[in-house]
Image: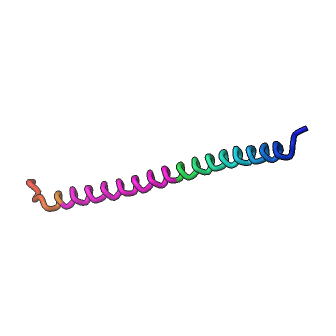
């Protein structure tokens, strides 16, 4: 038969282990979300850069007189 002290110690240990597991899972979820959001923002900025470069090439083509 276990003492009341040992029983409480076991309960605290189980709660602590459970909490650590849940906190670890939450941290993984948050890290994944941050990674995904960062990727989307980076892709969006890349799209903007590509559009700006395409506009610059189009402007340069219009500024160059045709040699036909």
Q: Position of residue 32 (x, y in %)?
A: 54, 49
Q: Residue 17 in the image: x percent, y percent?
A: 70, 44
Residue found 26% across the figure and 56% down from its top: 54
Q: Nearer the viewer, residue 38 or 30?
A: 30
Give the percent coordinates (x, y) of residue 14.
75, 44
Residue 58 on the magenta segment: yes
Q: Judge from the rendering whether residue 53 lies leftward or rightward of residue 16; answer left or right.
A: left
Majority SS type along the magenta span:
helix
Given residues 16 and 46, the one toward you in this image is 16
Vertical relation: 56 (above or below) 18 = below
Q: Position of residue 47 (x, y in %)?
A: 36, 55
Of the pair 50 and 16, the residue shown nearer to us: 16
Quadrant containing the N terminus in the rendered view: top right
Q: Quadrant of residue 58?
A: bottom left
Question: Which quarter shows the C terminus?
Answer: bottom left
User: Residue shown at 31%/54% (left/top)?
Assistant: 50
Query: For the magenta stretch, what is the residue range?
Result: 34-59
Q: Residue furthest top?
A: 1
Q: Is residue 49 above or below residue 15?
A: below
Q: Residue furthest right?
A: 1
């Amino acid at each position: 038969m276990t003492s009341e002290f040992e029983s409480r110690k076991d309960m605290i240990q189980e709660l602590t282990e459970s909490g650590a597991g849940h906190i670890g899972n939450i941290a993984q979820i948050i890290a994944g979300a941050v990674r995904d959001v960062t990727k989307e923002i980076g892709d969006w900025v890349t799209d903007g850069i590509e559009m700006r470069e395409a506009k610059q090439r189009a402007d340069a083509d219009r500024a160059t007189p045709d040699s036909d």
